[in-house]
């Protein structure tokens, strides 16, 4: 029996040939991650997508491991049949990822494009600094969801924690549950739609005027993801009082600084 070792290519034999972990069926593949380390799972996923040209990968039993599905810069479909830990699906550009479970902190961080759908709840800092694509969480999300968001769309079907949309720069959020205090605090641009109750608005987050483009956008996103008829939504935008600190009144300067 050949001795196995592990390097940047994944699990390899000493003679350099790679044993197949996944079961391949044309452009589809599936493998069980129960006995694999995070490094091996990601290496096998990258091998399938980049070397084998697989367009649809299913990973069973991810076991809530951290940092799975990161750095995939290719159009493909990835299904995690289970929950992920922290920093899942970060730094991606193009894939459609379905997590059939929960995700921990900082899922989808710095996402450039693509789609991530989470069937369960998500931790704090979900979709931090994303620039494009859609993140759909069917459950609840923690604090600071969409912090420093620079584009894309975040859709949450459940409640959202405190400081959601903090320092938001661009993009949109659709929050169908109740939202904690500090919504849109210090946001610079972008739009936040809320169906539930908002405990408190953050600094410089104000109600916005509804337009036909808002109606079209909401209807399109609900249709894409089969969410049914949109409920009545409140719209929140940046009040632009923080654009120029030097013209703030003393009382406002104390509040902001």
Image (cartoon, rainbow, N blue to C red):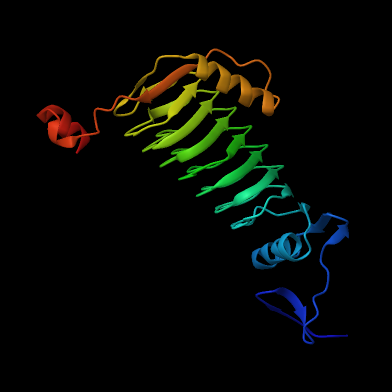
Decide: is 145 above or below 16.
above
Where residue 98 sits, quadrant-wise, is top right
On the rendered structure, is 46 left or right of 93?
A: right
Q: Is residue 23 left or right of residue 166?
A: right
Q: Quadrant of the N terminus?
A: bottom right
Q: How many marks?
A: 0
- Farthest residue to the front: give it: 213
Image quadrant where one finds the C terminus:
top left
Find residue 148 and report its horizontal and vertical position in percent.
40, 42
Q: Nearer the viewer, residue 252 or 133?
A: 133
The residue at the point 45 percent across, 14 percent down is 210
Image location of residue 242, percent across then percent down = 24, 32
Rendered view: 4 above or below 85: below
Q: Residue at x 65, y 37 (%)?
A: 120
Q: Is residue 141 visible?
A: no
Q: Quadrant of residue 36?
A: bottom right
| 123 versus 34 height, above or below | above
Residue 245 seen anywhere in this rendered image of the structure: yes
Is 26 displayed left or right of 213 in the figure?
right
Rendered location of residue 104, percent (x, y): 57, 47
Question: Residue furthest toward the left?
Answer: 250
**Relative image position of residue 204 (x, y in whole percent):** 29, 27
Using the image as rendered, state which of residue 60 and residue 236 is in the foreground: 236
């Amino acid at each position: 029996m050949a001795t196995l070792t592990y390097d940047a290519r994944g699990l390899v034999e000493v003679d350099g040939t790679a044993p197949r972990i996944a079961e391949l069926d044309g452009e589809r593949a599936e493998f069980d991650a129960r006995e694999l380390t995070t490094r091996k799972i990601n290496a096998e996923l990258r091998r399938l997508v980049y070397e084998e040209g697989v367009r649809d990968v299913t990973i069973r039993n991810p076991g809530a491991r951290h940092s799975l599905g990161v750095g995939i810069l290719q159009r493909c479909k990835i299904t995690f049949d289970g929950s992920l830990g922290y920093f899942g699906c970060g730094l991606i550009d193009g894939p459609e990822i379905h997590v059939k479970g929960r995700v921990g902190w900082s899922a989808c961080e710095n996402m450039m494009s693509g789609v991530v759908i989470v069937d369960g709840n998500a931790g704090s800092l979900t979709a931090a600094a994303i620039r494009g694509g859609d993140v759909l969480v069917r459950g609840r999300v923690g604090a600071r969801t969409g912090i420093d968001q620079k584009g894309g769309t975040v859709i949450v079907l459940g409640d959202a924690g405190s400081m959601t949309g903090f320092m938001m720069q661009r993009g949109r959020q659709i929050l169908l549950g109740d939202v904690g205090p500090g919504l849109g605090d210090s946001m610079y641009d972008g739009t936040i739609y809320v169906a539930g109750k908002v405990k408190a608005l953050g600094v410089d987050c104000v109600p916005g005027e509804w337009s036909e483009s808002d109606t079209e956008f909401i209807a399109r996103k609900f249709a894409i993801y089969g969410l049914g008829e949109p409920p009545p939504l409140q719209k929140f935008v940046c009040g632009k009082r923080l654009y120029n600190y030097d013209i703030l009144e003393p009382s406002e300067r104390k509040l902001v600084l």
